[in-house]
Amino acid sequence: MTVAPIDLFSCFLHLRQGGEIEAAPRALDDERDGWRLTAFHAKTDADVHADHWEVHPEAEEVVSCLIGKLRLYLRPEEPGLQEEVIRLTAGTAAIIPRGRWHRMELDTPSSIMALTLPRGSRLEKRTAAVPAARNLPPSTAPPYGDEPGPGWEGSIEMGTYVVVGAAWWAPRPPGSWQGAGTR
C-alpha cells in the first residue's frame, strides 16, 4: 500500500468497522458502513446550513473548530425552553449527544472537522416556533382554540424564534395553550 497525503477538505474519510480507512470523494451516502470524518472551510452561515437542524440518530458527533470561532446550537428538547449555545474557538471541540438536533453559526470564517456515524442522519429546515404562553407578554398571548383571535397579526421575536401571526394553535385546556407548529 502506498502512503500519500490526503486533502481532508476535498474528501471524506470513512472509518470502517474492520479497521480500514477509506478516503473517498465527497458524496451524500449516509448508508455506508462505519464512521465519517469530514473537514471543511466555512466562510458564511450558508456554508454550515445554519438555517437547518441536523440530527444523527445512530451515534454522537464530535464537532471541532480547527481555525476561527463558531457557535453550536442544541435545539430545546421541550417546548418553551431556550436553545443551548456552545461556543467553539480554534482548537476546541464539543460532543453532541446521539439523537440531539443541532445547528451551527459562524462568528468568523472557520475550518471545521466533524466525526460521526452518518447512517440515518437528517436535516430539517428551521421554521418558526411557538414558545409557551408563559414566555409571552399577556397582551400578545393568543386565545384558547385552534386559531389566533382578532388582532393577532404580525410577528413576535422570542430569542432565536419568530412567532408569525399566521401560526396555528392546538386546543389545550384554558391557561395552558402551546403552539402546535414544529420547532
Image (spheres, rainbow, N blue to C red):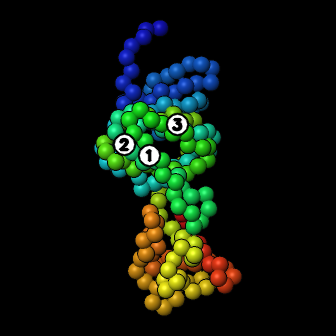
Q: In the picture provided, is 25 more to the left or to the right than 183?
A: left
Mark 1 is on which residue type? Arg
Mark 2 is on which residue type? Lys
Q: Name the spot of residue 134 as percent of width and height, x first.
A: 57, 75
For the residue pair 95 and 2, the one nearer the viewer reads as 95
Mark 2 closeness class: few <14, some 14–19, many ≥20 residues within 10 Å: many
Name the quadrant containing residue 19.
top right
Mark 3 closeness class: few <14, some 14–19, many ≥20 residues within 10 Å: some
Q: In the picture provided, is 139 more to the left or to the right than 70?
A: right
Name the residue carrying label 1: 87
Q: Name the spot of residue 124 as percent of width and height, x first.
A: 50, 55
**Distance between the Cα atoms at labels 1 and 3?**
14 Å
Name the quadrant containing residue 178.
bottom right
Q: Name the spot of residue 113 as percent of width and height, x first.
A: 43, 34
**Distance between the Cα atoms at labels 3 and 2?**
16 Å
> Can residue 31 be seen by looking at this rendering?
no
